[in-house]
Amino acid sequence: MAGKKLNRSATSRLFKLGGLAGRVGISMAGNTLSRMFRDKDQAEAHYGQTLMKNALLVKEAFGQMKGVPMKIGQMLSLHENLMPAEVARVFQSLQKNAPAVPFDEILEMIKQELGDKYDLIAHLDETAMAAASIGQVHRAVLKDGREIVLKVQYPGIDQVIRGDLRNFRGIIKTVFSLFTRMDIEEMWQEMKDRLLEELDYLKEAENMKRVRDNYKDDDMVVVPEVIPDLTSKHVLAMEMVMGIFPDEATSGQYPQELKNCWGRAIASLVLKGLFKHRFLHADPNLSNFAFREDGAIVVYDYGCMKAITEDLCRKYARLVKAVIENDYPSIPVLLKDMGVYKAEGEPVPWEMIKDYADEIQKIIPPEDTYTFGIDSNIYKRLQVLGQKHLDQFMVMVFPKDIIFIDRTFNGHFGNLNRFRAEADWRSLVIEHIADALPDITIESSDT
């Protein structure tokens, strides 16, 4: 993982993104023109080559820039079925294998942040275990013999992200305006708040302690212990807890029964986070997880967490209950109560609700299991529904509090597809929404 200097200049970063967009745009336009002079097979082959070339170009630029661009690239990687498999794998590499920052910069940051406490460290690996959008991870050994990992923030990344958020806001709002007439200000503010929270590693340490306490009785969720003496605003120290990396875990090396266990553990983590603890791990990148042969999952990154009010928790539970019980007519009212409705104040049309709820029903069939990834057409059907209801989406209002909740569920939908995880998901969902609705009976089959 070669070290490259982080580009901190706001002007240079904006220029680089603009140049990248121009190069990709010209390339794709040229491909469209060339298709007119090729037969079908040649045209498809050339299109695939062009797409891969541009994906690699974008991935490399995003990985080097870190910050907001890399976050966008990581989000693109969550739904591998929305793009060609080869392109998805290119962006998935941003989750774990982004270029690292040179070790001398990282070492300077560690010494500056820890001061005299740096003397507690006997050895520090120069090669990063992983590099992400805001920081990278290095293995260390303390003088008392304990193996730990240090998550170290890139020097100056806080100013870079604040600059990105200022500079890209107008561009993103302009792009959104091409597709929707809804006001995205609240959505932008929510994304900004979550990203800025990720810059404070003391806050992340508090999050880790809280989640570790929440899941202390759950054998399927492992949360590393924070080491307070070596933790600061820009350095987070924790015990080393290893597991199987995602690429290995989702490969053919492990039996499907074990993959099913990992899938259920991920689903339970999210469902408990929403309906029981009301504190959701809201970054579904699979690189934030490792996997154990006893079926447990190790959860690493706690920078992006979403606290959920009791009121919103119960509203989500009632919404899910209505879907499970096929009570479709009540869903528009429930959504409006959550703040989801058409811009003029009208509820979401019932026909639109039914189309999407019918797709969800296929995942949670009564008294049966469902295998993620086995229905390769589900993304195509969702895309068709998106086109069918495009006019409705263009005038929809969404409250900011649901953005990262929905992002988490959508991201893990893609993760469960990678595992091809099978389970009785309906029973699992009913078990967990009961935490939010203890006073209400939930039917386990169609009504």
Image (cartoon, rainbow, N blue to C red):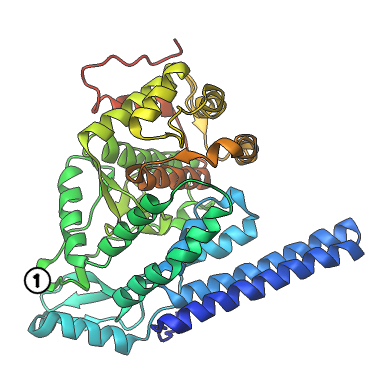
Quarter of the rendering containing residue 202: bottom left
At x 86%, y 58%, the residue is 41
Residue holding disc 1: 229
Viewer-nearest residue: 268 or 343: 343
Q: Position of residue 434 (x, y in %)?
A: 27, 24
Q: Amino acid at mark 1?
A: Asp
Q: Position of residue 45 (x, y in %)?
A: 80, 62
Vertical placement of residue 44 versus 59, above or below: above
Quarter of the rendering containing residue 137: bottom left
Viewer-nearest residue: 178 or 102: 178
Quarter of the rendering containing residue 428: top left
Q: Is residue 38 visible?
A: yes
Outermost residue on the bottom side: it is: 104
Outermost residue on the front side: it is: 344
Q: Position of residue 315 (x, y in %)?
A: 30, 29
Viewer-nearest residue: 160 or 374: 160
Q: Is residue 428 visible?
A: no
Outermost residue on the top side: it is: 447
Vertical placement of residue 186 versus 260, above or below: below
| Label 1 element class | helix
Q: Position of residue 370 (x, y in %)?
A: 51, 30
Q: Is residue 177 left or right of residue 345?
A: right
Quadrant placement of the N terminus = bottom left
Vertical placement of residue 50 versus 314, above or below: below
